[in-house]
């Protein structure tokens, strides 16, 4: 068979990296052929996370428009400690992370490359690569056993971890072998709770229920040797590890997919040797944590494409190819270092608990979170050097996020909030508001499990994060029980117990009782729930609140107007305003603000608000002649919880819809 010679660049491997590169080269005027071993595109999606810098690159090439709206990937993590990547730059059009199955990305990049003129040859397994100084010759065995030779000016290995080009091209792949591995499986027919990087005495476990009802489990047994076999693990191995770490039996399930990954860390010493170049996993191998491998590879390809095309078309000299190595090698090395640190934090056993604690403490600092988020998002690599995002492309994705969410999104990213009494009513609206602004919310309640679960589900449905904690307030041990749940839940999800925002909302109310008929028992109950519990919640939260924390106490307009049938209840709200006043001064040196919000009559979803006559009577109290809505109180609380309210403390914010203006029948 005569060799194929009308080629400038041979790209080996039709994964996302090879296909992006092929498209860029073709667009830049190079004749490109892509050789791919597989006869059909893979349906397996090993990676699915795209970061802000990659989104920019895809936007610049019109690829985002082709992909259509991508779902928001929610907050990310650093070594299992929650880290909202939107904090890298909340104003960036692609701040955060985005979900796109690898198979879908490959299909679109393949389409683009072919449309731009690249030739994609599947079923071509590269078996020989020779750099002959003035050209390269690559031999590939085709499906019917023939050997086809391709002659070109350059060849680029985008052929993954086990790169043939790297091997045959004589590149030196330096680094460290695996010391730990993690087992992964998709299992049908099991019912276990979702958990995210849950550290348990014997290991680390993650479980996530897919929409089809199967569950993705990931497990690592502390101290276990890595699995050195090339193939997937036995299901029995996964079952045994899961049982050891979580104490749950999943052996009755059906494994749909089994896989293992490890912390091997290697990088070639040079990204270019003569006429051979490497990009993506062929150039660096790392643990696939947080989607960084795919993003790093796509960014390699984007940097190489324009340079190599310029070299081919004669507008640049050989040195641009050395520049590719000079630029991308340190970036790859830096990514490998962050991944190694994350692997240590994630898979280290009890011996790294102290390190995790220090790390989690550092991550309470906004500049630290921003630094790490920028590093992972790829935004610290000199965005100014790159073409701006086109308006057309950015709208394709941004439109997918509700605009009101975007306007506040990120303000509370990476923060955590406790809202007492958030199973229902005003508390639920507050929980939803804070979660929408990016906070991880603890939904506290007394007895109503279903309502609390519903609040959490509503938050999660909207892409937020929350968990519920049950603890009746006003009884002995109440605050202790509450914080056991709060601290455990936070630790599991964020690796620490930092609590940025405390909203004392839970409240006991009474139907009107004339002052003569208030019993000592009723008086004590109201004070226990509405005044004593909030005081001790604040006291207990003090060590958890970081610099710049927020305490918001839900008071009542009844502290400012006389309604004698509510005297005992109003006294409790007067007491909560005293918590606000005194703690505001006490906590100001720590930058913590403390404020009260006083609602008027507010629709909390209870039956009386379904009665039009009652609502009409209640509406008369407000200057606006209507009752308040729970989300109107939530908006005030969300503002107070955010950075824009940092100069407000020790105050009472009237959220009564003008009830205190006195037009009502009071
Ligand atoms: P709500 O609908 O009655 O909901 C009360 C919430 O507090 C529920 O989540 C409930 O949990 C929880 N809770 C009640 N007693 C508790 C206890 N002993 N221990 C722990 N949790 C308890 O209340 P709301 O009307 O939204 O009122 C919220 C806050 O706003 C209260 O502080 C109230 O005083 C104040 N406020 C309300 C109005 C108004 O018109 N709605 C006006 C002024 C001030 P379960 O679901 O488990 O029972």
Image (cartoon, grey):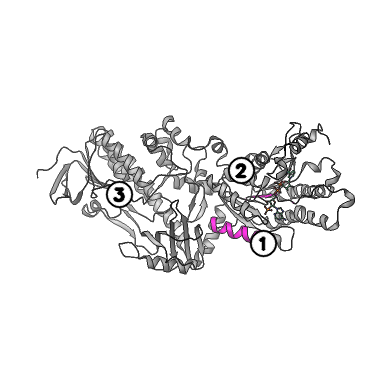
Q: Quadrant of residue 529?
A: bottom right
Using the numbered discs, state the Cα–Cα distance from disc 1 to disc 3 in whole angstroms. Answer: 50 Å
- Disc 2 to disc 3, C-alpha distance: 41 Å
Quadrant housing the C terminus: top right
| Label total for image | 3
Mark 3, Cα crowd under 10 Å, few <14 / some 14-19 / many 20+, is some
> Which residue is the site of mark 1?
481
Residue for badge 3: 42
Give the answer, above or below, for where 579 lies relative to 227.
above
Q: Which residue is at the front of the view, 484 or 379?
A: 484
Q: Residue at x 24, y 37 (%)?
A: 118
Q: Is residue 335 left or right of residue 275?
A: right
Task: From the image, tell me which residue sits under label 2.
Answer: 433
x%, y% of residue 212?
Answer: 43, 52
Q: CA distance from mark 1 to mark 2?
A: 25 Å
Q: Is residue 292 above or below residue 487?
A: above
The disc, 2 or 3, on the residue closer to the chain's N-terminal end is 3
How crowded pointer 2 is (Cα within 10 Å; few <14, some 14-19, many 20+) is rated as many
**First in sequence: mark 1 or mark 2?**
2
Mark 1 surroundings: few (<14), some (14-19) or many (≥20) residues within 10 A: some
Of 506 and 665, nearer the camera is 665
* Range drawn in magenta: 479-507
Give the x, y percent position of residue 636.
67, 40
- The answer to whether the residue labelled 1 contacts the one labelled 2, judged by CB atoms less than 8 Å apart, is no
**Is residue 373 found left or right of 28 in the rendered image?**
right
The residue that appears at 46% across and 63% down in the rendered structure is 348
């Amino acid at each position: 068979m005569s060799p194929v010679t009308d080629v400038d660049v041979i790209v080996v491997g039709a994964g996302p990296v090879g296909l992006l590169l092929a498209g860029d080269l073709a667009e830049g005027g190079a004749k490109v052929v892509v050789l791919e071993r597989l006869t059909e595109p893979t349906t397996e999606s090993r990676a699915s996370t795209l970061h802000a810098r990659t989104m920019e690159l895809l936007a610049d090439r019109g690829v985002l428009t082709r992909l259509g709206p991508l779902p928001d990937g929610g907050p990310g993590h650093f070594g299992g400690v929650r880290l909202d990547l939107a904090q890298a730059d909340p104003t960036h059009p692609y701040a955060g992370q985005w979900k796109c199955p690898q198979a879908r990305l490959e299909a679109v990049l393949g389409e683009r490359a072919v449309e731009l003129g690249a030739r994609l040859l599947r079923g071509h397994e590269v078996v020989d690569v020779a750099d002959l100084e003035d050209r390269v010759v690559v031999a590939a065995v085709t499906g019917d056993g023939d050997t086809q030779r391709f002659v070109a000016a350059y060849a680029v290995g985008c052929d993954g971890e086990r790169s043939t080009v790297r091997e045959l091209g004589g590149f030196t792949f330096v680094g460290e072998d695996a010391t730990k591995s993690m087992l992964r499986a998709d299992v049908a027919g099991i019912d276990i709770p979702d958990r995210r990087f849950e550290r348990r005495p014997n290991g680390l476990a993650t479980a996530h229920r897919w929409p089809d009802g199967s569950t993705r489990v990931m497990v690592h047994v502390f101290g276990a040797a890595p699995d050195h076999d090339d193939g997937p693990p036995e299901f029995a191995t996964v079952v045994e590890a899961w049982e050891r770490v979580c104490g749950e039996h999943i052996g009755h399930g059906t494994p749909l997919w089994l896989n293992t990954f490890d912390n091997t860390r290697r990088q070639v010493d040079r990204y270019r040797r003569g006429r051979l170049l490497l990009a993506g996993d062929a150039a660096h191998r790392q643990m696939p944590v947080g989607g960084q491998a795919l993003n790093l590879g796509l960014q390699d390809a984007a940097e190489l494409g324009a340079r190599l095309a310029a070299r081919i078309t004669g507008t640049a000299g050989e040195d641009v190819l050395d520049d590719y190595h000079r630029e991308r090698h340190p970036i790859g090395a830096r990514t490998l270092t962050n991944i190694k640190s994350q692997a240590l934090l994630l898979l280290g056993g009890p011996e790294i608990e102290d390190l995790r604690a220090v790390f989690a403490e550092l991550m309470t600092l906004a500049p630290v979170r921003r630094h790490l988020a920028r590093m992972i998002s790829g935004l610290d690599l000199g965005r100014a050097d790159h073409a701006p995002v086109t308006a057309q492309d950015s709208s394709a994705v941004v439109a997918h996020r509700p605009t009101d969410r975007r306007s506040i999104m990120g303000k509370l990213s990476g923060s955590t909030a406790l809202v007492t009494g958030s199973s229902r009513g005003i508390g639920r609206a507050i929980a939803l508001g804070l979660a929408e602004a990016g906070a991880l919310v603890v939904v506290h309640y007394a007895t109503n499990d279903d309502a609390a679960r519903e609040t959490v589900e509503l938050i999660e449905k909207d892409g937020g994060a929350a968990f519920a904690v049950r603890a009746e307030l006003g009884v002995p041990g109440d605050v202790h029980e509450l914080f056991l749940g709060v601290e455990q839940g936070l630790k599991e999800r964020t690796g620490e117990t930092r609590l940025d925002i405390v909203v004392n909302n839970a409240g006991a109310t009474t139907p009107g009782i004339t002052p003569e008929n208030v019993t000592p028992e009723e008086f004590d109950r109201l004070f226990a729930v509405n005044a004593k519990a909030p005081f001790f919640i604040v006291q207990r939260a003090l060590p958890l609140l970081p610099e710049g924390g927020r305490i918001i106490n839900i008071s009542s307009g009844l502290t400012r107007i006389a309604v004698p049938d509510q005297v005992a209840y109003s006294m409790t709200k007067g007491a909560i305003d005293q918590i606000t006043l005194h703690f505001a001064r006490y906590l100001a040196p720590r930058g913590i603000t403390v404020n009260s919000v006083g609602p008027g009559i507010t629709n909390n979803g209870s039956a009386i608000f379904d009665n039009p006559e009652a609502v009409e009577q209640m509406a008369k109290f407000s200057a606006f002649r209507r009752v308040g809505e729970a989300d109107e109180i939530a908006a005030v609380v969300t503002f107070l919880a955010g950075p824009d309210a940092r100069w407000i403390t020790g105050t009472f914010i009237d959220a009564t819809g003008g009830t205190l203006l006195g037009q009502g029948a009071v």
